[in-house]
Image: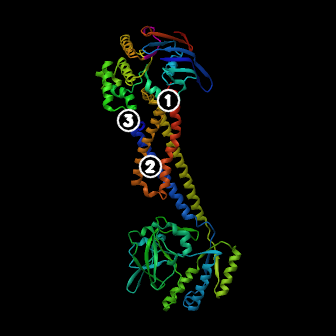
């Protein structure tokens, strides 16, 4: 009977009801967009900045000329052992983020993917090898630790690298993740021919990165939408040719030029460790340098400030929506006094009247929620990573916040203005 | 029979407590048409609302036949009101956007009376009150007298033991007032108790008995 009466009231007051439903739907939709974006930005910000919270020490060699060293098999083996000690020492994290461009055979993309495109145009990006044209494109090679700490949570559809992917086998096929702008250029499963220091390797497309994926490197954020992100492999295979030996040498020199995030060591302690490994393997010296984090810090501060402003806006919108709902319902209640009196005189109790008023609000609110949910589903669903939370927050919280004052006011109003 | 024993009513507000009824005693028998007279603010409407079960007396006892209404819980009193009391108010308390039929049907709807039975009952009462031709009309298009008849029909449709009317002719012209009073005279013959609150001496003269109330006390019976 309560809901039946509430429904009748709604049909008798079509214009007010429709306006209320549209207002609720519009408000909820806007709140969803705002809260969704706040959540999205917060999640993205945390993803991007969570791993770049410490000062990294960048290592680089100063070997000149490099050619004779790379061509010396014994030196290469020493470099590999030296690298292995550094990469497996658990007193610090050893990151590899090698930004060496790579040559791709029969490249399907446009110039935007080419090395140097963003810096005034790509120059000398084409070369011929075995009668095939190779194009030099932007590449970033990561070791497993760097992948896990900086990129794993930015891979679309959660298809990324596993630890096994970082070991090269005889097939010379490695997985590759492509930046978001590569979508439509290559597809998952495609095999791309690459040329790296004279050796052809194959990269099989594992998946794509989320749009805007980025990682910190040398004090800057590197945006990966136009990058190929490959694994920086550990090679245990013995070189079968001079070319392969040369390739392994070049690869390991790049791998050695990584960065270190100290965990259980101080800087002098780390220098001692580095020196001990150098002497152990009879290696050349590695230099240590840092990059100022100004750019990343500014970006981080700016992003957090924007998030705070959005949160404030969202809260203001929430308060406004709730206030208008409560005031609107209260106004509507006072205008409905005569009808309520008629129902009271006809035999309804004050409690029935209150329940009818709350039922009206529930029905109108439900109408608004349904409309808003449809709009969200068709227009704004992908904007939110934690959809259930945002939906609950934007669709249900205003109801919970407004129904209590409405209930209290309805009880008072009925007892003081309708009953007497 | 209605029996009121030392009924008191005090309205409590944040700052002051206002004593509106100060020990009202009276008895009203079935088949009686009784008027309660008094100045504005004397306590007529409050007494009527207590008899009607809309308000709870602060102290005292109120019996309808053998039922002690003052001892009832709020829920029981609500049911008592719904079953035993018919209310007519000065401003009619009708829903203007509904037809006369829908307004009269409201109490039956709240009782979940089947539609066919409701239709039959409404037709009967409408014929009795000579408003059958008005049933399909929206209430806001009716005259004051017609509205009051519709309000009476709504009060009577649930066959109440007690019919309470607060200034039932207050907004009507003389001719219409007379018709309504004749109607109330007729209705009391069904062994009903009819109590009306009024300022009008003419209305009071048409009743079987007049209770005069002044400053919350019954001064003559």
Instruction: Report helix, strand or loop for mark 2.
Output: helix
Position of the N terminus of chain A, as image quadrant, is: top left
In the image, A343: left or right of A272?
Answer: left
| Crowding near the residue tagged with mark 1, few <14, some 14–19, many ≥20 C-alpha atoms within 10 Å | few
Indicate the chain on which mark 1 is placed.
B
Q: Which mark is residue B76?
A: 1
Residue A360 occupies which quadrant of the picture?
top left
Indicate the chain on which mark 3 is placed.
A
Horizontal and vertical percent for residue A174?
Answer: 46, 79
Residue shown at the point (48%, 47%) measured from the top left: A396
Q: CA distance from mark 1 to mark 2?
A: 45 Å
In the image, A360: left or right of B220?
Answer: left
Given residues A57 and B38, the one toward you in this image is: B38
Marks 2 & 3 on one chain: yes
Residue lying furthest left? B133
* Residue B197 belongs to the span the image colors magenta: yes
Q: Which residue is mark 2?
A: A29
Given residues B80 and A207, the one toward you in this image is: B80
Q: Which mark is residue A8?
A: 3
Q: Is residue B167 visible?
A: no
Residue shown at the point (46%, 9%) measured from the top left: B209
Which of labels 2 and 3 is toward the front? 3
């Amino acid at each position: 009977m309560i809901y039946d009466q509430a429904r009748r009231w709604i049909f008798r007051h079509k214009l007010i009801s429709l306006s209320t439903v549209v207002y609720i739907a519009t408000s909820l939709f806007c709140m969803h967009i705002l809260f969704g974006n706040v959540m999205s930005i917060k999640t993205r910000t945390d993803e991007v900045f969570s791993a770049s919270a410490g000062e990294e020490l960048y290592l680089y060699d100063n070997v000149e000329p490099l050619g004779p060293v790379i061509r010396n098999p014994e030196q290469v083996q020493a470099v590999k052992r030296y690298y292995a000690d550094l990469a497996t020492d658990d007193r610090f994290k050893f990151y590899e983020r090698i930004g060496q461009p790579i040559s791709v055979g029969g490249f399907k993309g446009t110039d935007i993917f080419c090395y140097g495109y963003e810096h005034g145009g790509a120059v000398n990006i084409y070369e011929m090898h075995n009668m095939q044209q190779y194009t030099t494109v932007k590449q970033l090679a990561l070791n497993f630790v760097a992948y896990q700490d900086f990129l794993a949570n930015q891979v679309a559809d959660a298809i990324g690298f596993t630890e096994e992917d970082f070991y090269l086998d005889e097939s010379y096929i490695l997985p590759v993740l492509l930046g978001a702008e590569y979508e439509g250029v290559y597809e998952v499963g495609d095999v791309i021919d690459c040329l790296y220091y004279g050796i052809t390797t194959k990269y099989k497309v594992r998946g794509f990165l989320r749009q805007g994926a980025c990682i910190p490197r040398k004090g800057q954020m590197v945006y990966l939408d136009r990058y190929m992100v490959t694994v920086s492999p550990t090679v245990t295979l013995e070189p079968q040719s001079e070319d392969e030996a040369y390739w392994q040498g070049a690869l390991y020199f790049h791998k050695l030029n990584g960065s270190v995030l100290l965990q259980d060591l101080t800087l002098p302690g780390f220098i001692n460790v580095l020196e001990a490994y150098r002497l152990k393997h009879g290696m050349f010296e590695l230099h240590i340098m840092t990059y100022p984090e100004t750019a990343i810090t500014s970006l981080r501060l700016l992003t957090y400030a924007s998030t705070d402003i959005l949160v404030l806006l969202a809260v203001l919108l929430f308060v406004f929506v709730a206030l208008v709902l409560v005031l609107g319902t209260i106004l509507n209640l006072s205008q409905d006094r005569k009808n309520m009196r008629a129902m009271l005189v006809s035999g309804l109790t004050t409690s029935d009247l209150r329940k009818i008023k709350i039922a009206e609000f529930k029905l109108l609110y439900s109408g608004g929620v349904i409309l808003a949910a449809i709009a969200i589903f068709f227009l704004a669903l992908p904007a939110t990573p934690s959809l259930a939370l945002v939906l609950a927050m934007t669709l249900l919280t205003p109801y919970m916040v407004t129904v209590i004052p409405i209930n209290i006011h309805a009880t008072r109003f009925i007892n003081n203005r309708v009953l007497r | 029979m209605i029996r009121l024993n030392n009924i008191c009513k005090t309205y409590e507000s944040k700052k002051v407590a206002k004593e509106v009824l100060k020990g009202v005693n009276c008895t009203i028998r079935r088949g009686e048409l009784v008027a309660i007279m008094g100045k504005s603010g004397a306590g007529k409407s409050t007494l009527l609302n207590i008899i009607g079960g809309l308000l709870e007396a602060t102290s005292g006892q109120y019996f309808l036949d053998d039922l002690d209404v003052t001892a009832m819980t709020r829920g029981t009193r609500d049911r008592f009101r719904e079953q035993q009391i018919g209310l007519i108010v000065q401003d009619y308390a009708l829903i203007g956007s509904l037809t006369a039929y829908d307004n009269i049907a409201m109490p039956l709807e709240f009782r979940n009376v089947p539609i066919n039975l409701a239709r039959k009952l409404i037709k009967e009462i409408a014929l009795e009150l000579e408003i059958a031709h008005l049933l399909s009309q929206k209430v806001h298009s009716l005259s004051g007298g017609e509205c009051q008849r519709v309000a009476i029909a709504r009060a009577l449709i649930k066959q109440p033991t007690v019919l309470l009317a607060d200034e039932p002719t207050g907004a009507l012209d003389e001719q219409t007032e007379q018709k309504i009073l004749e109607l109330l005279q007729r209705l009391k013959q069904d062994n009903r108790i009819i109590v009306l609150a009024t300022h009008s001496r003419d209305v009071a003269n048409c009743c079987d008995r007049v209770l005069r109330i002044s400053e919350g006390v019954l001064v003559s019976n």
